[in-house]
Image (cartoon, rainbow, N blue to C red):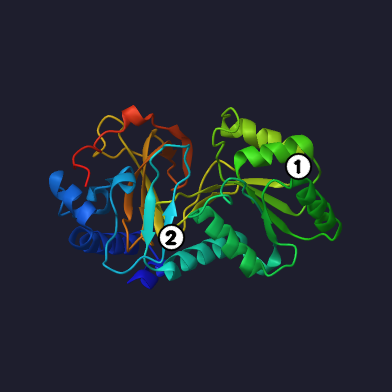
Amino acid sequence: MFQSVFNISSSTNFEEKALAIFKHQLENNKVYGEYCRLIKRTNPQSLKEIPFLPISFFKSHKVVSNTDEHKIIYTSSGTTGMVTSKHYVTDLEIYDSSLDKSFEITYGKHEDYVILALLPHYLERSGSSLVYMAQRWIEKSDHPSSGFYLNNIKELTSILKELKEKNQKIILIGVTFALLQLAEQFPQELPQTIIIETGGMKGMRKEIIKQELHDILRTAFAKASIQSEYGMTELLSQAYASDGIHFETPAWMQVLTRDTNDPLSLLNSSKTGGLNIIDLANYNSCSFIATQDLGKVMPDGTFQVLGRFDQSDIRGCNLMAME
């Protein structure tokens, strides 16, 4: 089943596969099935009738749709003492396929780029899906200069200068606070370079809005393309924004918005609400997730991320007792 989700050809095809996957997960995912029964949403007739599992369940329950042994557990980052999400992945081939196909759709061939990953903190802990993604890119790039950078940004700056002189195409993927540090200490012109920020201050710096962040990066790294990636521990797919703001999803992923006061009701396009993610690659986990992100979906299907819910604003998450 899972390979077929990467061959979606139309909105009708997407809906058919989504409904089929819903039925599978209703029957085989204990957590999601119980949630659907509690809210009395077990027989959707259309895409918009499919219920979305609040993402907080990944912190308190094992969300899986089969009985296979997990290959890896991805965990979310968090401050000391915070309960983190756990995503039990039973088939890494699905994640690899999603990563590879999304990259090729968005950027072309891995081997055309040197991949540089500036991911401090993420590299210092285990279970980061972002690190796994960057490692996959680096391996498929197969370039001797591709690699990870922890806190050695001076070395990274030297590598960037050398590659620029060779007119080499570069993708620099990094977390927000590290990219800002690089921008402040080592600004330089970076033609032939795509900088992908993945978000994340992680308590290291004061939060700033995305537009301000991108303005800083564009000033510091003249001629570079400043872009954004949207992904999370609980998903197996990512969306990318070539302009840094409007995220585009691959064919097997779709975003909807829900009413912040009525989480079971969906909103029309261009209205701000909670983001609901359909990730059909998440066949073995849960493909229908209500995130804690606020945003809006545009008429063309792209979406913007505008902020996050305060924890006290999350509704509909207390229907099931902790197990």
Tag count in the figure? 2
Tell me if mark 1 has few (under 14), some (14-19) or many (20+) residues whose alpha carbon lies within 10 angstroms of its own: many
- Which residue ends up furthest to the front in the rendered image? 81
User: In this rendering, would 22 be left or right of 251?
Assistant: left
Q: Is residue 109 above or below residue 228?
A: below
Image coordinates of residue 264 in percent, x first then y, are 23, 39
Image coordinates of residue 53 in percent, x first then y, are 28, 47
Image coordinates of residue 285 in percent, x first then y, are 32, 59
Please identify the quadrant where the N terminus is shown.
Answer: bottom left
Q: Quadrant of residue 105?
A: bottom right
Give the spatial CA distance, label 1 vs label 2: 32 Å
> Does the CB distance between marks 1 and 2 fall below 8 Å?
no
Query: Would you say residue 295 is visible in this rendering?
Result: yes
Image coordinates of residue 323 in percent, x first then y, are 21, 47
Amino acid type at circle 1 is Phe
Amino acid type at circle 2 is Ala
Label 1 sits on a secondary structure element that is loop
Tell me the number on the disc at residue 260: none
Residue at 34% over, 61% down: 14
Residue at which label 2 appears: 251
Residue at 42% over, 37% down: 81
Which numbered disc flags the more N-terminal residue, 1 or 2? Answer: 1
Q: Is residue 115 above or below residue 312?
A: below
- Which residue ends up furthest to the right in the rendered image? 165
Label 2 sits on a secondary structure element that is loop
* Badge nearest the viewer, 1 or 2: 1
Residue at which label 1 appears: 221
